[in-house]
Image (cartoon, rainbow, N blue to C red):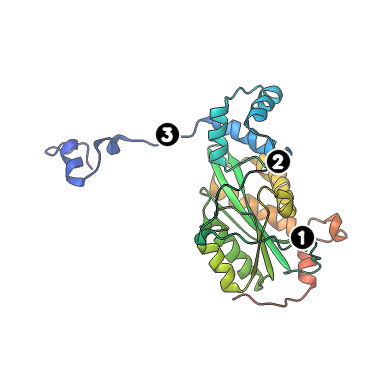
Amino acid sequence: MDKKHPQISMRRQSKLLGVARSTADYKAAAEDPEDIRVKRLLDETYLIDPCLGSRRLVTVLERDHGVKVNRKRMDRLRREMGHEAIWCKPRTSIPDDGHRKYPYLLRKLVIDRPDHVWCTDITYIPMPRGHAYLCAVMDWHSRKVLGWAVSNTMGTSLCLEALEMALNSTGRVPEIFNTDQGCQFTSAEWIGRLLELGVKISMDGRGRWMDNVFIERLWRSVKYEEIYLKEHATILELRRGLHKWFERYNHWRPHENLANLTPAHVYQATPPTTKAA
């Protein structure tokens, strides 16, 4: 559309193109800086106590940070972040075939070798002018991050990108893959890819963040040691920062629970028993 066309008016151009007149004048508004600040505080609070509901969060933000937020705004911001308080809920619906749920297979399971269990999760990443989402795939035994991906949308494609990176970088396939019951991990695309690989699928109980505790602990580390300190302004800067952090985490940082060895050392100490498809 040409606003300075000498013969055809904007109204006529809109009619010819079949678009609303208001579309030509619309300019996307940037996210409110105050909303971004509140989201960051909510994200930090969620790492401390994921069981707080909107009523308590309103109290905590005002008491600890002097931020006054009503519950309606609080619910909207948490919905945009993908945050939900952990609490016991009634079983009000049954999933259809496209969103099948699988049982939790790790209860009382001795995980004593790499590639026995892989796990994955998604977390919200606050940024100065918006937000992003991070998905990582971790080997349960060695704690090594095998693959990860960043996007400004929280879709199944983000998770599949992290999974493919893990498969390509290791050339291995796990026996069991554990996730939560998020819609990304119950989608036909995700389930189909795991079944194609011949992997046993395990899912956390609803609201049971402890069932995937190691990757939840990873989120706390990466946020306090990288995200909150550096506040990357763009997705490209965020990817570069995360690449350096994950390299240091995998290959340099000793873990007390691994006899002060690095995750990469523990993962590579055992030869692969399965190959990626």
User: How many neighbours does mark 1 have within 10 angstroms: few (below 14), some (14-19), or many (20 or more)?
Assistant: few
- SS state under label 2: helix
First-in-chain label (3 vs 2): 3
Name the mark nearer the viewer: 2 or 1.
1
Identity of the residue drawn at 55% across and 31% down? 35
Q: Which quadrant does the N terminus fall into?
A: top left
User: How many neighbours does mark 3 have within 10 angstroms: few (below 14), some (14-19), or many (20 or more)?
Assistant: few
Q: Nearer the viewer, residue 191 or 103?
A: 103
User: How many neighbours does mark 2 have within 10 angstroms: few (below 14), some (14-19), or many (20 or more)?
Assistant: some
First-in-chain label (2 vs 1): 2
Instruction: Verify CB contact (< 8 Å) between mark 3 and mark 2.
Output: no
- SS state under label 1: loop
- From the top left corner, tell me how far across and down residue 28 is, in percent: 39, 37
Identity of the residue drawn at 51% across and 49% down? 153
Disc 1/disc 3 C-alpha distance (Å): 48 Å
Disc 3/disc 2 C-alpha distance (Å): 30 Å
Residue 276: image tag = none
- Name the kind of residue labelled 2 in the image: Leu
Residue 68 visible to an observer of this rendering: yes
Name the mark nearer the viewer: 1 or 3.
1
Return the residue at label 3: 29
Q: Can you say whether 275 is above or below 157 in the image? A: below
Return the residue at label 1: 107
Q: Residue furthest right?
A: 259
